[in-house]
Amino acid sequence: MIPDLDHLRRAYAATSKATQVTPMLESAALASRTGAARVFVKPESLQWAGSFKVRGAYWRLKQLSPEEAKRGVVAYSSGNFAQGLAAAGQALGIPVTIVMPIDAPAAKRDATAGYGATVVVTDHGQRPREEVASERARQIAADENLVLLHPFDDPEIVAGQGGAGLEALDQLSARDARVDILFCPVGGGGLIGGVSLAFHYLSPRTAIHGVEPEGFNGMGNSIAHGGIETMPLVAPSICDGLMARRPGVAPFAAVQAAGVRGMTVSDNAVRAAMRIAFERLKLVLEPSGAASLAGLLSGAVDVSGKTVLVIASGGNVSLADFMRHVADA
């Protein structure tokens, strides 16, 4: 269930041949603002397809048999896994069908189709959107004999996303930096699962904080209670990629093993973080991608004199939405 270090390294060796090495940015401005000794930001927003998701998607597709790859795959996603899987499928010549909720950002739907995927849109009404989309994906898999993939609850997805952590550790070592505190956004938990395992194995002294939007802290709540719990339905967050109501089994096992701690941020804090990332780092982050920076800036974790790493997970946001969020900050 929990990928070991060799598993993470094998996944990274395979995916690194097809993905970007995203930069490691150091910000004196953020260090001064927060009182940290050093602050580093790894912008997975600059990854192929605009987020970390392509790492796990590419690795998962590489695990298919030739017959499965020929038939194709289907998955549900609100956006970033959709784009990552579509891009990976296009690169590997594997047909991809994506089921997306009707309220997924139009920019993400269009980009997914642009990578050659077949996009099916579901209207969930008053039901949880993931529930409706996953039901449709399962039906399509049965009807069309496709391989059904989960966007985050899969040990292979966790292993693939762990490449972001291994890559970060290599980059930090080259900068003679040892991270005391890590902030990483959390939706279903694929990224935090993989990244936390990488740091658990290679930098066990690092305190890892999983950052979720208020009302969608399924991972943090599950960590606190020692078992997977489902959050009640609440009004949507601007962090559309982090609105999973419960973590996946595989990611939860990983974060428990790594000793991750949970925390939440408000939409207003995320907007402010988007603006600061743009002004200070010249990064365009989507709300979900800026949640981790909002966690640092919130002051809820004492970073005085510490070396901090922020994983900025994605930048798939339309110009209109970005400008609106930044203007509202």
Image (cartoon, rainbow, N blue to C red):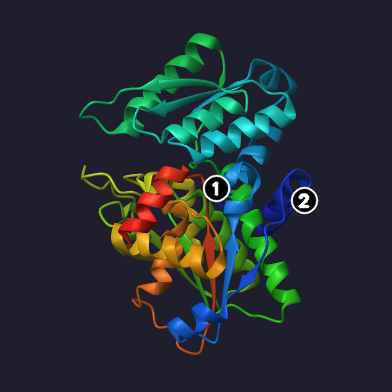
Please state if 294 lies on the left or on the right of 215 as rendered.
right
Q: Is residue 181 above or below residue 269?
A: below
- Residue 3 can be seen, yes or no: no
Image quadrant where residue 138 sits: top left
Task: Report which quarter residue 102 is drawn in.
Answer: top left
As drawn, the label of residue 45 is none
Task: Identify the secondary structure beneath mark 2.
Answer: helix
- Residue closer to the observer: 226 or 255: 255
Q: Tag 1: Cα neighbours inside 10 Å, few (<14), some, or many (≥20)?
A: few
Q: Assign the C terminus to one quadrant of the image.
A: bottom left
Q: Report the Cα–Cα distance between label 1 and label 2.
A: 20 Å
Q: Which residue is mark 1?
A: 1
Could you tell me which residue is drawn at 57 percent across and 76 percent down? 27
Residue 13 tag number: 2
Residue furthest top as drawn: 143
Camera-nearest residue between 61 and 327: 327
Instruction: From the top left corner, tell me how far across and down residue 117 is, in percent.
Output: 58, 23
**What residue is drawn where x is 47% and y is 59%?**
255
Q: Is residue 13 above or below residue 318?
A: below
| 83 left or right, relative to 303 | right
Examine the rendered structure and indicate whether residue 84 appears above or below residue 207. Answer: above
